[in-house]
Amino acid sequence: MQFSNSETQQLLQTTARSYLQDAFPWERLYALEDDKEQISREDIAKFAELGWMGLVAPEAAGGGGASLLEAAIVIEELGYAAVPAPVTVSNVAAFALQTAGASQLAELVSSKQTYTMSDGVRRLRSVSEGLSASGGKLAGSLPLVAFATISDVVLTPLTIDGERAFAALPLSDGEQEPVKLLDRTSYANVRFDGVALDNVNVLATGPAAVALHEQCDALTTALTTVELAGMMRRVLELTAEYITGRIQFGQPIAKFQAARHRAAELLMSTEMTRWAGYHALWRFQEDPADTEEIWLAKHYAARAADPVYQHSHMLHGGVGVGTEYPLHLLTQGIIALAVRGGSLNELTERAILARGLAPAEQAS
Amino acid sequence: MKVASMVANGEIPVHEASLLKVLSNEFRVTFSGEVLQMLGEVGLLRRESPGAYLDSSDDAIERQLRESTILLFGGGSNDVQRDIIATHGLGLPR
C-alpha cells in the first residue's frame, strides 16, 4: 500500500490548487455568497477542459482514466478552496454510466451535457416516494437536486411499473423550484408529474438498479468526506496562521496552552478524517460492494467537523465571523458537508446494514 | 435561575455567571447541530428558500447554527470564562 502521493497525484494536486486559487479568490466566493455571482456553465466548461468532470471515466471514452483515489485529490482541493462545484456529482454520474455501460459517458466527459445526481432522495422513506412511473408517465418529484439549474441530466433511482430502476432523466422535462442552501450551492426541487417516459434512459432495473444506487450513494459519501477533509485543512491552516500572528500580553496567542491544545485537536480531527475517507475510498475502489467503511468514515467526519469550526471560531474571536474574513465561508461549508452525503442517523443505519448486523427491513 | 436569584439578592455572580455562559451557548451550538443532523440536508435550506424549517423571520435552523458560534466568544470568550471558573469557582492559582 502506498501512503504518499505518486507523481500523477502530486501533479493533480498542484494543478488544482493553482487553478482554484486563481479562478476562485475569496472575493469571488464572497460574491457567490451574496448571490452576485453563480457557478456558471463557463466554469463547468473550464472544469471539463481540466478533465475534472469525468476524472474517473476511462481514457477510451475521453475521460481522465483516473482512479477514485486520484479523483479524490481534486475533490479535496475543491474543499480546500471552498468552491461549491459540481465535480463530485459529475464523477459519481460518470462512475454510474461507466458501470452501466451507457453510451452517454462521452457527452458527460466533453461537458456537452452536464450530469448531476439526485442525492436528495436519501431522506425519503422509499425510492417510490420520490419518483415513479406507470402507464408510460412519470409522477412525483426529486428533492434537493444539486446544481440542477446548471445541469442537463439527473441520474436517479425510481420505480417503473412497481420495479426498481436507475435512470437518466433530462432536467428540461421537469419543473424546477430553485432553493438556496447554507453553503451557497444552487439546488432545486424538480417535479416530473405527467412527463412521458420517452426521454428517460434506463440504466439498470431490478437488483442491478438497487446495487447501482447503493454504489452511487456510497461513492458520493466517500468523496464528500474527502471534500470535507480539504475544507477542515483550510480552517486548520487559517487558524494556525492567525494564532501565530495575533499578539496578546506580549506574545503570540499560539504560545498559550489552551490555544495550542485546541489547534492540536483541529489537526488530529482533520488528519483522521482525511485518512479515514481515503482508506474507505480505497476499499470501495477494490470492491464497490464494500461500503461499510465509507459510512463509518463519514460518521466520524461529521462528528469531527463540528469541533473543528467551533475551536477555530473560539481561537479567532470576533474576526472569525466577519464577512471580510474567509472563516465564515469555510464554517458554512463544513456544516453543509457534515450533513451532505448522509446524516448521522442514515450513516448509522447504512453501517449496520453493511456489517450485516440487522436485516434491511429492521434497519430502515 | 440561580444566577438571577443571586442578582436579585444583591450578590455578584462571578464564576456562576461564567459557568452559565459557557454551558448555555455551547449547548446551543450542540443543540442546533443535532437538529440539523436530524433534519438532514433539508435543514441547510436558507430561510428564504421554500421548504426551510422554522423559516419565519430569523429562525431557520441554518441561521441558528451560524449565529450560535458567535456566542462562543461574544460576551467574553469561553476560554476566558473557564479561567474565571477555575480561579473564582475552584480557587485555583492564577
Image (tube, rainbow, N blue to C red):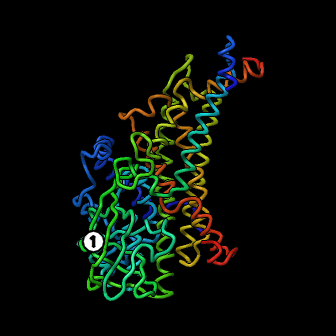
Q: Within 10 angstroms of label 1, few (less than 14), some, or many (20 or more) residues?
A: some
Quarter occupied by the C terminus of chain A? bottom right
Chain letter behind tag 1: A
Image coordinates of residue A235 in percent, x first then y, are 48, 43
Q: Is residue A169 above or below residue B20?
A: below
**In the image shown, does A67 or A10 lie closer to the viewer?**
A67
Q: Is residue B3 above or below residue B59?
A: above
Image coordinates of residue B19 in percent, x first then y, are 67, 27
Q: Residue furthest top?
A: B10
Image coordinates of residue A347 in percent, x first then y, are 58, 64
Q: Is residue A196 above or below residue B13?
A: below
**In the image shown, does A206 or A307 lie closer to the viewer?**
A206
Give the residue displayed 26% in from the left and 68% down from the top.
Answer: A175
Give the residue displayed 55% in from the left and 32% down from the top.
Answer: B72
| Left/right of residue A156 with respect to residue A177 in the rendered view | right
**Residue B10: quarter of image:** top right
Image coordinates of residue A312 in percent, x first then y, are 53, 37
| Left/right of residue A34 with respect to residue A234 in the rendered view | left
Quarter occupied by the N terminus of chain A? bottom right
Going by the numbered disc 1, the residue's amino acid type is Gly
Give the residue displayed 41% in from the left and 79% down from the top.
Answer: A158
Q: Which residue is mark 1?
A: A174
Give the residue displayed 54% in from the left and 54% down from the top.
Answer: B37
